[in-house]
Amino acid sequence: MLAAAVPGLAMNLLSVDPILINHRSQYQSFVLPFLILAAVDGYAILQRRVEKDARLPGIALGAAACFALILTSRTFNDFSIRHWRLGPDQQSALALMAQIPKETAVSANERLVPHLVMRENIFVYPRGMGISSHVIERSEVLERTPAPGYTESARGGGWVLLERKED
């Protein structure tokens, strides 16, 4: 069972995209069923091999459950309630998005697209360049992948709002 998880893990771990490598992203979720089945198989193997102490499989299962609880606690887990509130970074992004006229096409960071999805034309940056009148993206992304023909109109919290130059 554990071998079935190897192709998915290899695909994500050999990627150069930091989001695919992050263990807290959804891209690792298709590996989880195989890991759970491998854990069940491991428990069954451990139970068959133990002759002297029949409590060992139960102890191992309890230790694994405690370890899983520790890893999902507020200290380790990005999905804890303290992350549900908008921080300064998210508030800055919302303020910049509010400056974009509703009827215009936008090329935006993939994390902001859900906030802009009701527009007729919304693109994930760098798609939609030349069509979009506005671009909203992280400053470090724009440093690596510039947007020619656009000028900066606002900035905040690591986000940059660009507007297309008028010809």
Image: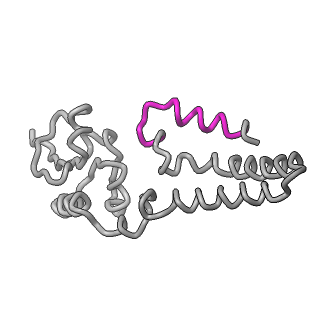
Observer-nearest of 111 and 66:
66
Magenta stretch: includes residue 88? no
Residue 121 position within the rendered picture, expressed as x and y whole percent measured from the top left: 33, 53
Tell me which residue sits at (47%, 39%) in the image: 21
Task: Name which residue lies at 29% across and 49% down.
Answer: 108
Left or right of 20: which side holds 60? right
The quarter of the picture where residue 148 lies is: top left
Q: Nearer the viewer, residue 163 or 5?
A: 5
**On-image quarter of the N terminus:** top right
Task: Give me the residue at 15% from left, 44% from top.
Answer: 164
Q: What stretch is highlighted in magenta?
A: 4-20
* Residue 100 visible, this orientation: no
**Residue 6 in sight:** yes
Relative image position of residue 42 (x, y in whole percent): 78, 47
Q: What secondary structure is the magenta-colored segment mainly?
A: helix
Name of the residue lying farthest toward the front: 52
Looking at the picture, how far across and down is residue 55, in whole percent?
A: 80, 59
Number of numbered discs overlaid on the protein picture: 0
Q: Which colour scheme is used?
A: one colour
- Can you say whether 109 is above or below 83 in the image? above
